[in-house]
Amino acid sequence: MREADRLRCESAEPLRRYLSRPNPKSCLVFSDAGFDRRRLFYKTLRAGAGRVDCSPLDESRIPLWVRERLRERGFGISADLAEAIASGAAGQGLGRLDAELQKLMGAIGAPRPIQAADLELLADVPRVADAFRLAACVARGERGEATAALRALLRSGEDPVRLLGGLSWYFRNALKARVAGARRLPAREMTLLYGLDPGRVERFQGEIGRTAVRVLREALRECLRADRELKGMGPKDPAHALEGLIHRVGLGRRRTA
């Protein structure tokens, strides 16, 4: 029932009696964002009925929601891939995100752990494998290879903002892997603190080579700079913004070497 705050309750006793023994075959939902919590009606409902918070999820909680949604159907997914999905679908709403997850599970078929290549089935997630290879080239300071790969992706129609989201995701997780690897933590503690298992830490370290923590932090700052440029605080030229990121991160790596 919408606009529940308009209902009037002269006495709480009939409602209280019903809530103590409700009809097991019925479900009544009262919905009103402006429900006056001082009123008798609300207080009586609150004491005897369940309350479900339907406000939008905080952005930081969406990756966990993705993991739980997939696990309900038997699909495993790592924390970093769940974060990539949430990043790609940012601002689309849970309804759209859920529809994309249903499409992903339907395309895969039998439940199994979800791999990075599977994310290419999602409309709002960049070409993950290509984006990751590009990011690894950038981190290693391979400016020529990275620029060529970037131009090929843009020519193929890849959305620059989503591509930037993939780069940012990779740099962020590569940084976590570098820090986690240096601390030499037990596997369980590493996963709890950084959302990365030892195998994934080793993979990132193999891909980024000797890239220093300072370079990865600088890469994330450059992602923010490129994001501002793409969204109207600069020339708004996708190639210019992303190639500038590649160039500046590469120069920063040379200064560190």
Image (cartoon, grey):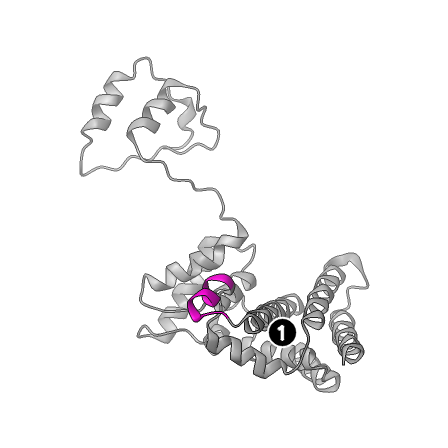
Q: 122 and 226: which one is in front?
A: 226
Residue 236 falls within the magenta-colored stretch: no
Question: Is residue 22 among what the camera can see?
Answer: yes
Q: Residue 206: horizontal and vertical position, in percent?
A: 57, 83
Q: Is residue 187 magenta?
A: yes
Q: What residue type is labelled 1?
A: Glu
Q: Quadrant of the N terminus?
A: top left
Q: Is residue 200 left or right of residue 182?
A: left
- Looking at the image, residue 249 sits to the left or right of residue 127; the answer is right
Q: Mark 1 points at which residue?
A: 158
Q: Can residue 156 be seen in this view?
A: no
Which residue is rendered at x = 45% and y = 27% of the image?
35
Query: How many residues crowd around disc 1 within 10 Å: few (fewer than 14), some, or many (20 or more)?
Result: some
Most frequent secondary structure within the magenta stretch: helix
- State the residue in front, 124 or 252: 252
Residue 82 drawn at (x, y percent): 47, 65
Residue 167 x %, y %: 63, 71
Residue drawn at the location 28% of the way across and 28% of the way down: 48
Question: Magenta segment, which residues?
Answer: 185-193
- Identify which residue, 66 or 250, lies in the foreground: 250
Q: Is mark 1 on a helix, strand or loop?
A: loop
Where is residue 134, by image quadrant? bottom right
Q: Residue at 55% x, 64% y: name it.
A: 88
Specify whether 204 is left or right of 230.
left
The quarter of the rendered structure image containing the C terminus is bottom right
- The answer to which image quadrant residue 71 occupies is bottom left
Question: Image quarter for residue 15?
Answer: top left
Q: Which of 78 and 167 is in front in this view?
A: 78
Vertical relation: 102 (above or below) 43: below
On the image, the x and y values in percent for residue 51 come to 36, 36
Question: Left of 155 or right of it: where is 63?
Answer: left
Residue drawn at the location 37% of the way across and 69% of the way down: 76
